């Protein structure tokens, strides 16, 4: 039942992300409460601790990509909710599945939107900025002259990643 609830929550997040490119904080909060409640119900204090550890690790999985503007804050929080439901042990395979799905989704989205050349220009600009600033003590991404090529609804990648992981469990 726990995984069905998680998948339903992910589908709702996906619908919002596809439509508005945002994931509502109320949905994230409901996910946190549900994951913690289910952890507490299934394993008492130990289950709640397991859920909290999963949330922390889930947060850390995508957090490094947020300042690089590769994912949004809602995506980071959504992965934290996933961690709360599945626990720390499942985050590695889910993350691998999610990154693969994210690459496929991003590639298809860029090709479909006709933004491939802009995305390549952005990548070149970011890499040049990094190369020039590494010796100067830091990378200021605000110095990069990039324009958004296409904003990928990463909740879709997270949903596909969790879905393929769940299929592997059966």
Image (cartoon, rainbow, N blue to C red):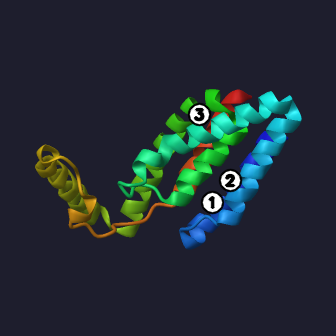
Residue 24 visible (yes or no): yes
Q: What secondary structure is marked by label 2?
A: helix
Q: Is residue 37 above or below residue 149?
A: above
Image quadrant in which the C terminus is located = top right
Residue denoted by label 3: 91
Residue under circle 1? 14
Question: Is residue 170 rendered to the left or right of residue 108?
Answer: right
Quadrant, the N terminus: top right
Q: Quadrant of residue 19?
A: bottom right
Q: Is residue 156 visible?
A: no
Number of the front mark, 3 or 1: 3
Which label lies toward us, 2 or 3?
A: 3
116 shown above or below 84? below
Q: How far, Cα to Cα, is label 2 from label 3?
A: 15 Å
Q: Earlier in the sequence, mark 3 or mark 1?
A: 1
Measured in 3D between alpha carbons, the distance from the residue under mark 1 to the one under mark 2, in whole angstroms, is: 6 Å
């Amino acid at each position: 039942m726990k995984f069905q609830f998680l998948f339903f929550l992910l589908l709702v997040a996906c619908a919002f992300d596809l439509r508005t490119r945002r994931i509502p904080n109320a949905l994230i909060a409901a996910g946190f409460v549900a994951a913690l409640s289910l952890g507490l119900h299934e394993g008492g204090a130990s289950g709640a601790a397991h859920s909290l550890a999963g949330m922390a690790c889930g947060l850390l999985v995508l957090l490094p990509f947020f300042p690089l503007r590769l994912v949004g804050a809602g995506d980071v929080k959504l992965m934290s909710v996933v961690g709360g439901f599945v626990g720390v042990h499942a985050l590695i395979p889910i993350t691998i599945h999610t990154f693969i799905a994210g690459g496929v989704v991003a590639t298809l989205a860029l090709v479909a939107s006709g933004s491939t050349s802009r995305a390549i220009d952005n990548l070149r600009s970011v890499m040049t900025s990094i190369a020039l600033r590494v010796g100067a003590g830091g990378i200021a991404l605000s110095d990069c002259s990039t324009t958004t090529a296409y904003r990928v609804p990463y909740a879709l990648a997270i949903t596909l990643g969790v879905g393929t992981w769940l299929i592997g469990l059966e």
